[in-house]
Amino acid sequence: MAGPPPPCATLLVFTLLFLCTEAEGFAALQTKVFKYRIWDMDQKLLYLRNDQLVAGHLQGANAALEEKVFWVPNRSFAQARQPVILGIQNGTRCLASPAAPRPTLRLEDTDIRALPRAGDASAPFTFFRSYKDGMWRFESAANPGWFLCTSARAHEPLGLARGPDATRVLDFYFQLC
Ligand SMILES: *[C@@H]1O[C@H](CO)[C@@H](O)[C@H](O)[C@H]1NC(C)=O
Ligand SMILES: *[C@@H]1O[C@H](CO)[C@@H](O)[C@H](O)[C@H]1NC(C)=O
């Protein structure tokens, strides 16, 4: 026989709901999301093609296709390494590179504002930034020695590479919008 829950149980549920809502609100306040522009050394911008991030020169009306990068720091790592989690489309899709012998890069539908609290399962989302001569490199935290790169040819997918060569560009400009 299912009657109404006793009043104390109801009160407990409301208290828990209230605490959860408070915790969510607090965490949301703490996670400031930065909005940046990113483009590679050859002035190629990022945009989506066939649901993949590619880099190319966008002229005229196509300039509107440029994806801005939304990022948050991952405070679990030493801040000296400048760990960042990178996303596009208001941080609803994030760059991920799970540990692998030949790592690949993919876009995952996930909330950048929730990731800093997601624990070990989300380590693939972190990249270490390093700065030299006005440009940045982004090293995969899950794949040390592998960096975000564009193809030297236009309109090809963003990927990961060990070092720059004739076909890969590892250096990016990265600035507040
Ligand atoms: C971006 O996401 C935040 C948090 O979810 C939301 O408050 C904001 O309205 C979104 N902005 C746009 C332009 O969608
Ligand atoms: C942040 O770094 C910690 C420590 O390595 C890791 O456990 C966590 O998964 C990372 N979070 C993200 C979103 O990468």
Image (spheres, helix red, strand yellow):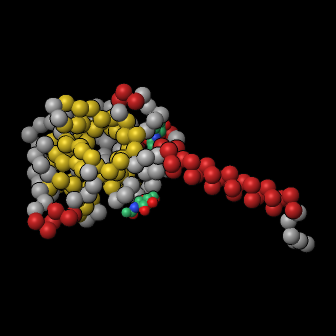
Q: Does 123 sit above or below residue 19?
A: above
| 52 relative position to 134: left or right | right
Name the residue at 88% across, 63% down: 6
- Judge whether residue 44 can be spotted in this image: yes
Q: Nearer the viewer, residue 83 or 163?
A: 83
Q: Does 123 sit above or below residue 95?
A: above
Q: Does 97 sit above or below residue 144?
A: below
Name the residue at 27% across, 55% down: 68
Determine which quarter of the picture holds residue 41: top left
Q: Quadrant of the N terminus?
A: bottom right
Q: Nearer the viewer, residue 172 or 96?
A: 172
Q: Position of residue 169 (x, y in %)?
A: 15, 42
- Judge whether residue 115 can be spotted in this image: no
**Total number of numbered discs in the rendering:** 0
| 96 relative position to 165: left or right | right
Q: Position of residue 84 (x, y in %)?
A: 37, 40
Q: Position of residue 149 (x, y in %)?
A: 21, 43
Determine which quarter of the picture holds residue 21: bottom right
Name the residue at 40% across, 44% down: 72
Name the residue at 34% across, 39% down: 127
Determine which quarter of the picture holds residue 142: top left
| 49 relative position to 10: left or right | left
Q: Position of residue 176 (x, y in %)?
A: 27, 46
